[in-house]
Image: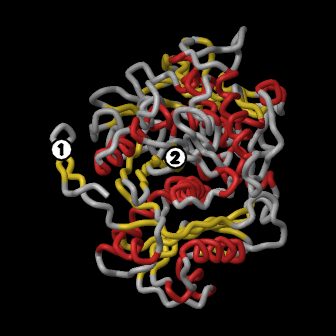
Amino acid sequence: MSDHRTVRCCAACGAVQSYPRPLCTACRGRAFEDRALPMRGEVYSLTVVQRAPSPAFMPPYTIALVRGPSGGLLMMQLHDFARPPVIGDAVSIEAAEGGLVGRPG
Amino acid sequence: MPTAPRSLPSWGWTVAKPQAAIIGAGESRIGRVPGVGALALMLEATDKALASAGLEMAAIDGIITVPVRSDTLSVSASLIARSFALEPRFINTIDLTGASGAAMVDQAAQAIAAGHCETVLCVAGQPLLSGMSRDGAVASMANSAAHPEAEVPYGPPVPALYALFAARHMHEFGTTREQLAAVAVQMRRHAGLNDNAHFQQPITVADVLASKPIATPFTLLDCAPVSDGAAAMIVVSAERARQIKRKAAYLHGAGYGIGHGYLSDALDLMHTGARRSGAAAFAASGMRPSDMDFASLYDCFTITLLLELEELGLCPRGEAGRFVEDGHIDREGSLPTNPNGGLLSGGHPGYPAGLLPVVEAARQIMGEAGARQLPRTDRAVVHGNGGVVAMHCTLVLGSENV
């Protein structure tokens, strides 16, 4: 998977679309636009993984669902937080090797 | 039996007499059952279901199963039919993962009502524990539950996906870590009366908190074990059920719902498809959540059971943690739930796990639950959860007294 430089958003309501789908899950809009990263978001939920699904991952690491600025959720790991991140924290959604990463926003 | 059809103007649904019933239910050995393949496990469960129904194998003329890839086989309805030397007039495979077991009963009822067949075997099983390594099972489940491009690259094992529900529930409603643990403790207490449970040794909240870390807030004992096992049910028309067997579990209502496909297409994890599936099943049955004598819910993780209690209307929204902590779901409580120990202690054989809550409810209603038989089992709500709280099917089952 290549790096994301943009995130697909609904042209009508702005909700982020975590994977491509023909209708916006939030408003049923059919037009989309790719918006540039970084983008502001907010931690909707998170978990610290202590047992990885495969040897490709080195625990512990934090996985979050991050809400986009106009709604919708994206999954990513959180990195570089000075204290353990919590739900509600502001996040800067950025491009990273293999996809997205959330940093303190 | 209700004197149907009755109409419930407030819901706008027509309540009909039950058209079908489960007359036999059984499970194979569940837990670590080495050296037994998927079809042999399914046969073990089928033999028990047939004995419970008082029927011979040759009576089966319809088969419903779930997609299972196990051993070296993809087990289909046709493969089960040939392996059991049957020539069914109706076959189907339901792909709602953990919701499939509940959906099987509804779809068997529809096939019978349509005249396709008379005696449907609903069966599924696999050696998820012995048939592949535990690491292999964990990896394969992770890849099926998360989106290959939008989620898998970030490394979420299945427990982490459910942990995202738990963390959000704790944030929104103040649910505590100890309340999650209380679910596991309660299920283990019930499993003490179930000799076929994967784990029976009692545990405490402290044991749960001290078990191996998995994905916050979960430790190992918040997660159902990976198990070998199979379950089977025999479904016939309600009319035949009354002729064949005095005690049967009649299907009074069924409902379906979805909240999302993958987690990252959800809009709000705290509003799930179980709300719709439960409302539809209760409306069709003409019964309310408060009418239920007991519940049989899909508890792959501790949070799953809390979400279902709330979404099905069995306790107020946000209060399931306290509801469990206060003992309401104990076999002596106001709503005995999973008297067999659920999936958390009873065992979880993958996709076939969805049959187990239905089998337990049917056995309780038929009076075949042995040492764990509850005193009042005329009305039950049964729930199956598929995907990661994605696909839902709810049933309302009842005895001949309803």
User: Circle 1 — which element?
Assistant: loop
- Please tell me which residue lies in front, B155 or B333: B333
Chain on which label 1 sits: B
Which residue is under mark 2? B376
Tell me which residue sits at (43%, 29%) in the image.
Answer: B268
Type of amino acid under label 2: Arg
Whether discs 1 and 2 lie on one chain: the answer is: yes
Q: Along the horizontal axis of the image, is B157 left or right of B278?
A: right
Which residue is under mark 1? B12
Q: With respect to residue B252, does A68 lie above or below? A: above
Tell me which residue sits at (19%, 44%) in the image.
Answer: B8
Q: With respect to residue B207, does B253 lie above or below? A: below
Q: Which mark is residue B119?
A: none
- Please tell me which residue lies in front, B348 or B271: B348
Earlier along the polypeptide chain: callout 1 or callout 2?
A: 1
- Residue B24 visible in this rendered orientation of the protein: yes
- Residue B277 figure quarter: top left
